[in-house]
Image: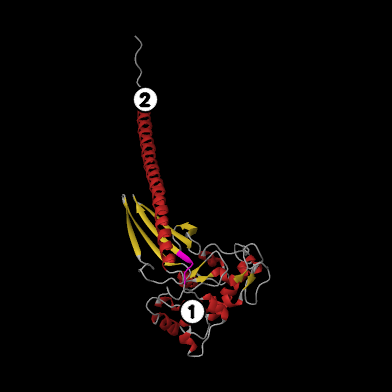
């Protein structure tokens, strides 16, 4: 009978070590696989929740369009704050989560696309009156004049069709010297956050002016509705007559608004006219008593997922129609 040979003691220890290493590696692989499976499962749940939240968002948009139609149809001549609709957060129930909607006058802001005239199908040219308004708004908000005017000119140069910079402005040559070179768009801006790329813009200035600006899909001068303005929005009125109309006077004009709103912009401008401050025909036409643009802000939480949506609605033609929607933080 052949004797059974025993492996040397050193080989027995090596075999045991190999087995222990294999067990450890398999354990790590199993743990990593379980973690990835857990993450994949959570991602799937989030994707389902986000899709469902977007569905609720579409339903909220339909409700908002109906509400806007009621507001527009209530009085064909003017839009007022009657009904307490402006800025009021309205919750609505959904299964397994919460949803809140807020409706605002989407024209009570500085339209950054107003610094040019024309449209995307024609040549876009700088509009001096809007450039002055943008600079004036920044100044009353606390931006230094030496910073405000170059930024306003740079905005016009960014959008207008030519490549020649305005005096004090910035065209391609200014951005070509950046660490990462880029060029001007020569087109309307789709979102107000795009002004961060402008020459002279800083994070501090952007944070200051961001709540006051918007990007309407037209080059019209900012259509300020004097019947829906809040006293805190007085700087939007002061910017209309740069250097002459103070924020305090503008606030008083809003505070003295009659119940039911102003019947015409002439009545609104009667107070500063008593002090010799008269708006130009262009500014007189710019101020409104009826709202065209409405902004919708939606916030939905569902199954641990969060969805933020902002939308712009055109209420000019019945029925009101959604012209733009964006997801994420609007800042």
Outermost top residue: 1
Q: Residues within 10 Å of mark 2 (few under 14, many from 20)?
A: few
* Callout 2 secondary element: loop
The span from disc 2 to disc 1 (Cα, nearest Å) is 103 Å
Q: Is residue 200 above or below residue 279?
A: above
Q: Is residue 128 visible?
A: yes
Magenta region includes residue 11: no
The residue beneath circle 1 is: 265
Quarter holding the N terminus is: top left
Residue sitting nearer the eye, 66 or 294: 66
Left or right for 222, reference 177: left
Which stretch is magenta?
Answer: 290-294
Residue 279 position within the rendered picture, expressed as x and y whole percent measured from the top left: 53, 83
Among the 4 quarters of the image, the one containing residue 257: bottom left
Magenta region includes residue 293: yes
* Residue drawn at point x = 41 percent, y = 83 percent: 252
Residue sitting nearer the eye, 77 or 273: 77
Q: Which mark is residue 8?
A: 2
Left or right for 126, reference 57: right
Residue 280 position within the rendered picture, expressed as x and y whole percent measured from the top left: 56, 82
Q: Is residue 147 visible?
A: no
């Amino acid at each position: 009978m052949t004797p059974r040979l025993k492996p040397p003691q050193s080989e027995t220890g090596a075999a045991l070590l190999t087995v222990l290493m294999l067990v450890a590696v398999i354990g790590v692989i199993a743990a990593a696989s379980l973690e990835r499976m857990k993450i994949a499962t959570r991602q799937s749940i989030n994707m389902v929740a986000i899709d469902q939240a977007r569905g609720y968002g579409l339903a909220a948009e339909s409700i908002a369009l109906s509400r806007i139609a009621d507001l527009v149809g209530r009085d064909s001549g003017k839009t007022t704050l009657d009904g307490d609709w402006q800025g009021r957060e309205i919750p609505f129930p959904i299964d397994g989560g919460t949803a809140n909607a807020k409706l605002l006058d989407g024209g009570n802001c500085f339209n950054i696309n107003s610094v040019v005239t024309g449209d995307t199908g024609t040549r876009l040219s700088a509009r001096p009156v809007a450039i002055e308004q943008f600079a004036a708004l920044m100044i009353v908000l606390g931006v230094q004049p030496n910073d405000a005017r170059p930024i306003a000119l740079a905005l016009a140069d960014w959008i207008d069709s030519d490549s020649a910079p305005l005096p004090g402005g910035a065209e391609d040559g200014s951005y070509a010297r950046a660490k990462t070179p880029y060029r001007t768009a020569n087109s309307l801006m789709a979102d107000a956050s795009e002004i961060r790329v402008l020459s002279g813009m800083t994070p501090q200035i952007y944070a200051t002016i961001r709540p006051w600006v918007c990007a309407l899909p037209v080059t019209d001068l900012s259509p300020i509705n004097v019947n829906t303005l809040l006293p805190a929005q007085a700087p939007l009125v002061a910017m209309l007559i740069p250097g002459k109309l103070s924020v305090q006077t503008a606030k008083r004009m809003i505070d003295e608004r009659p119940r039911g709103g102003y019947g015409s912009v002439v009545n609104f401008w009667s107070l500063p006219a008593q002090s010799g401050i008269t708006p130009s025909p262009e500014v007189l036409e710019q101020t409104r008593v009826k709202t065209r643009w409405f902004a919708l802000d939606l916030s939905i939480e569902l199954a641990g997922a969060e969805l933020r949506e902002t939308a712009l609605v055109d209420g000019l033609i019945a029925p009101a129609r959604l012209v733009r929607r964006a997801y994420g933080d609007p800042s």
